[in-house]
Amino acid sequence: MDKVISIVKYTDAERDRWNEFVDKSRNGTFLFDRGYMDYHSDRFRDCSWMAYKGDSLAAILPANIDSEGVIHSHQGLTYGGWILPPAHIDGADLLDIFQMAVRVWRGEGIRALDYKPVPFIYTGQPSEEDIYALFRLGASVSEVNLSSAINLQTLPGYNKLRRRILKKSKETPFQIEETSDAEIFMALVNNCLLRRHNAQAVHSASEIEILKQRFPDNIRMFILKREACSLPDAGVMVYDTGRVAHTQYIASTEEGRNKNLLTPLFDYLISTEFRHRAYFDFGTSNEEHGQYLNEGLLRQKFSFGATGVAYRRFFLDLTSGDCQI
């Protein structure tokens, strides 16, 4: 007889169990640790779920809920979705979990699910059982953003233009260092965003300081200085999952941009600092929920040897008869 599937809402009492599950999962990253998720709990009302198969924890769903009764997985994270154990849960199990969750959510008056699965490059094993389950439930694709990542195992190399830019940039004397100074780094980021996009970073310097204290091996900041300068001309913040090095923030001064000083900084990160990761992910090149593609930005990433990874998003209307359970 198959074990009964049950779906329960996460509470703080389950924090340690949750975090232990994330650590051992096949598709989880440090973003799902409660120490990361809960830092912005004042902005997002948590509505995470834990799925049990019998007495065993079988899957967890990092999520929040909005005022319209829509569950998001998760609005404060780049990706989310059901996080799975390394073994014992297959596609049929996850379909059962999803179907039971839909029943529970409907019973609680939840109207819809906005779902962002973990992109394949971040998973230690193939983990796209949720994509199949969403298809079976009648979910629609609501958004696709195109990221660019380098396969560091094959290291395809830079194109001719990037090699020329790298050679030219090295004519400027510089030094590269890792820093823990969130104030200086985020000042560089915000000045760059203000100058180029009239915007500010999602994270404040104090938030980055808190997160870096909690995850010192995962959140890392690298800066490049010209030898004559005390302040950085270029900087990259990397979220290191152990498998993927993801660029969270990229910034340069006007002088750093004119001298292409991000190029030697990226070269150092790709060829030296994170050479033994599986992928180096530059992030997406989209706006307007994927409808606009910044082709110039995309081609800059391609010039380093990066190719496409789709960051998909699904919408499941729980009030519709089309939602099959």
Image (cartoon, grey):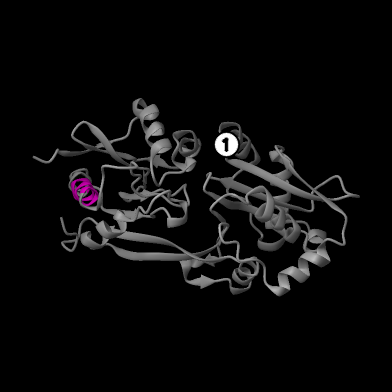
Q: As drawn, which residue projects farthest toward the top?
A: 13
Residue at figure coordinates x 21%, y 43% from the top left: 108
Residue at figure coordinates x 71%, y 46% from the top left: 222
Instruction: Report which residue position mark 1 lands on.
Output: 211
Q: Position of residue 231 (x, y in %)?
A: 82, 46
Q: Along the horizontal axis of the image, is 155 left or right of 261?
A: left
Residue at figure coordinates x 71%, y 53% from the top left: 268
Q: Along the horizontal axis of the image, is 302 left or right of 134?
A: right
* Amino acid, disc 1: Leu
Tell me if residue 95 is in the magenta stretch: yes
Q: Position of residue 12 (x, y in %)?
A: 37, 28
Tell me if residue 223 is in the magenta stretch: no
Q: Along the horizontal axis of the image, is 10 left or right of 223?
A: left
Relative depth, front residue between 305 and 301: 305
Relative depth, front residue between 29 and 321: 29
Q: As drawn, which residue projects farthest toward the left?
A: 1
Predominant SS along the magenta part: helix
- Any part of residue 58 in sight: yes
Residues rendered magenta in the picture = 93-101
Residue at figure coordinates x 71%, y 74% from the top left: 160
